[in-house]
Image (cartoon, grey):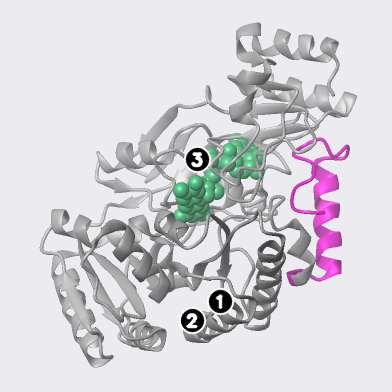
Amino acid sequence: MISKALLKEISGIVGKENLITDGEQMAEFSADATKIARMPDGVAFPSNNEQISRILGLATENGFPVVPRGAGTGMSGGAVPVQGGVVLAMDRLNRILSIDRENLVAKAEPGVITADLQRAVEAVDLFYPPDPASLKVSTLGGNIAECAGGLRAVKYGVTRDYVLGLTIVLPTGEIIGTGVETRKGVAGYDLVRLIAGSEGTLAVITAMTLRLIPKPETKRTMVAFFENVSMAVQTVSKMTRKRIVPAILEFMDRLCIDCVREEMHLDLPRNSGAMLLIEVDGNPDLVVQQARIIEELCGQCGAMAFQMAADDESAEGLWEARRNVSPSLYKLRPHKINEDIVVPRSRLAELGSFLDAVSRKYGLPVPAFGHAGDGNIHVNVMLDKEDPVQLENGHAIVRSLFEKVIQMGGTITGEHGIGIAKAPYLAMEIPSEGIQLMKRIKKAFDPKGILNPGKIFT
Ligand SMILES: Cc1cc2nc3c(=O)[nH]c(=O)nc-3n(C[C@H](O)[C@H](O)[C@H](O)COP(=O)(O)OP(=O)(O)OC[C@H]3O[C@@H](n4cnc5c(N)ncnc54)[C@H](O)[C@@H]3O)c2cc1C
């Protein structure tokens, strides 16, 4: 619990209208999308580096936790103030600072909503590809801290690949500019790549220089249904062999297809065991050519149905099943444990068989959907958390899923991060020497352990 005197000091730094301590007002800053909640002692809304530096300096001196927060859409509890303290909300640091069309870079503050930056750069025919499904609400700061992925990661990469430079404030209060403002740069250690994905545990990001690319001229959307996962995976392999990298390559399994069909009353083929949603983009001639090859490949691999959108409006129709899959799954059970594992994409069929087997063994539905193109699959263990047997079985499925994924050469999280939700499992993937090194890095940035404590490491 932070003393009243310290809260008064923080109020003096940000101005009393920019610090809230009232329980009711603070409630919305106590949780993220995991719904795990813990009340902070205060929520501060700083507006510049100096204010953040002074708050962090005060925290290091007095030993209270500080938790950076974007929009609170995180899926691993990263922004939850599990040990109380002050939440640093980035809402007021929300300006797009510049868009440089000559050098293809943009500068922005961390509280900018991802979709707002995308719209601004697309208005001048440029493109910022990272597209987490939460992009209409999540912030650039939160995206960098989690190294968010998204649907287009298969072709364009993840958030980290678009961050050239950062301004950060260390827990000790130092303000540091790191990285470059140019397209290249290798001076010293790459702190930018270290901060991207560090889940708000090493430094507070206060500004960023982002890499842009030219906006693709056109795109084509297709959907294909297969009898089973193997046929869908075979289609993906064939696309790779034809050197086609779709901008989007999404997958849904049988249970997901059945749920959206029933919940949304969509006309999806019955008895279909896998769906691929495919989008190619770029030069118009190439797009037409690639779409035609993909249609042929789907046919060769035995697709039971194939549809190509003629225009943007009909493409929206093809997206409907994928967009609605997550909420539709609640028809199976009232709760879900949502994991975002990654496996080599050539082994997706093996993953599918494994999920069928654990589902049967533990008596819980385990639907899976996600980014087939990069092997990043959202595995949903559906259960009633009020039932202790189901809860125990749910956790057993998660543990055996992680064992399987690691054995397959994959990772336990592709984009949601470790946070608090996966902290108990980190040691399954990272050997103890690796964890010790990470802890030494954490200590170098944050000697008193005040920045977002309780995250990543148990
Ligand atoms: C419906 C839905 C769909 C989603 N889809 C995707 C998806 O497709 N791909 C994907 O990768 N994720 C997805 N997510 C997860 C989430 O949106 C991302 O992790 C996103 O990057 C979080 O951004 P945020 O602004 O909400 O951050 P928050 O949840 O507020 O914070 C996330 C982490 O970042 C830290 N942080 C925030 N701002 C800063 C800062 N300025 N400096 C340092 N640390 C900071 C926090 O401390 C916390 O650890 C989805 C979430 C939802 C609810």
Q: Which residues are magenta?
A: 429-458
Kindly indicate whether the residue at mark 1 contacts the one at mark 2 (C-beta within 8 angstroms).
Answer: yes
**Residue bearing mark 3:** 140
Q: Which quarter of the figure is the C terminus placed in?
A: bottom right
Mark 3 or mark 1, which is nearer to you? 1
**Apparent side of residue 450 relative to residue 373 in the rendered image (left or right):** right
Circle 2: element type: helix
Q: Tell me where residue 237 sits by quadrant.
A: bottom left
In the rendered view, tell whether residue 52 sits above or below residue 441.
above
Percent across and percent down for residue 312 are: 16, 55
Q: Is residue 364 left or right of residue 437?
A: left
Instruction: Say left or right for 256 vs 416.
Output: left
Q: For ligand 1, which image quadrant applies?
A: top right
Q: Quick check: 138 above or below 40?
A: below
Residue at 83 percent across and 11 percent down: it is 4
Determine which residue is flagged by label 1: 343
Question: Hey, which quadrant is residue 53 in on the image?
Answer: top right
Question: Helix, strand or loop at disc 3?
Answer: helix
Of marks 2 and 1, which one's residue comes earlier in the chain? Answer: 1
Magenta stretch: includes residue 351: no
Which three-letter amino acid code belongs to the residue tagged 3?
A: Leu
Residue type (three-letter) at the residue carrying disc 1: Val
Label 2, label 3: how far apart the Cα atoms are:
31 Å
Whether residue 409 can be seen here: yes
What residue is at 74 percent from the left and 14 percent from the top?
10
The numbered mark at residue 348 is 2
Q: Residue at x 64, y 23 (%)?
A: 26
Q: Using residue 437 as the reference point, say whether residue 359 is left or right of it.
A: left
Residue located 72% across and 60% down the image: 388
- Marks 3 and 1, Cα distance to the nearest angstrom? 27 Å
